[in-house]
Image (cartoon, rainbow, N blue to C red):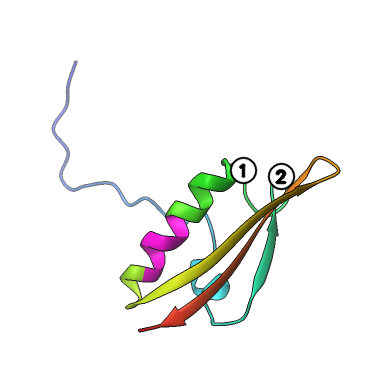
Amino acid sequence: MAKKLEKFPDRGKARYPWSEWLDGDPWELTKGEDFQCKPSTLRANAQTQAKKRNGRVRTAQATENGRQTVVLQFQRG
């Protein structure tokens, strides 16, 4: 049965450390170590997070020997 809440529940901390990853330096992230989603999903989420910070993000995706990586670099403006 549905129940009414006093307030919207707090989601807690963010799943990924976007403030760290979007500091302007290039970051190489590895699936299974740094993120769990599809690399394309991480790239899309990075674009959204960059827009929230009034910038954009360069991304590249690679697979080598079964290891999937995404490289991110935030650019302001």
Circle 2 SS class:
loop
Assess whether mark 2 and mark 1 are in contact (beta carbons under 8 angstroms). yes
Per the image, is 7 magenta? no
Judge from the rendering whether residue 6 lies leftward or rightward of residue 23; answer left or right.
Answer: left
Judge from the rendering whether residue 8 lies leftward or rightward of residue 17; answer left or right.
Answer: left
Residue 75 in sight here:
yes
**Location of residue 66 (image quadrant):** top right
What is the three-letter code of the residue carrying label 1? Gln
Name the residue beneath numbered marker 1. 36
Above or below residue 64? Residue 72 is below
Q: Position of residue 22 (x, y in %)?
A: 51, 74
The front one of 48 and 8 is 48
Structural distance between the alpha carbons of marks 1 and 2? 5 Å
Query: What secondary structure is the magenta-colored segment mainly?
Result: helix
Q: Residues within 10 Å of mark 2 (few under 14, many from 20)?
A: few
Q: Position of residue 48 (x, y in %)?
A: 37, 60
- On the rendered image, what quadrant is the C terminus found in? bottom left
- The label number, if any, that marks residue 7 in the structure image: none
Total marks placed: 2
Above or below residue 51? Residue 35 is above
Judge from the rendering whether residue 25 lies leftward or rightward of residue 68; answer left or right.
Answer: left
Per the image, is 46 magenta? yes
**Residue drawn at (69%, 47%), measured in percent from left and top?**
31
The front one of 63 and 37 is 63
Circle 1 SS class:
loop
**Residue drawn at (19%, 15%), measured in percent from left and top?**
1
In the image, which residues are magenta? 45-50
**Residue drawn at (17%, 21%), measured in percent from left and top?**
2
Residue 13 in sight here:
no
Name the residue beneath numbered marker 2. 32
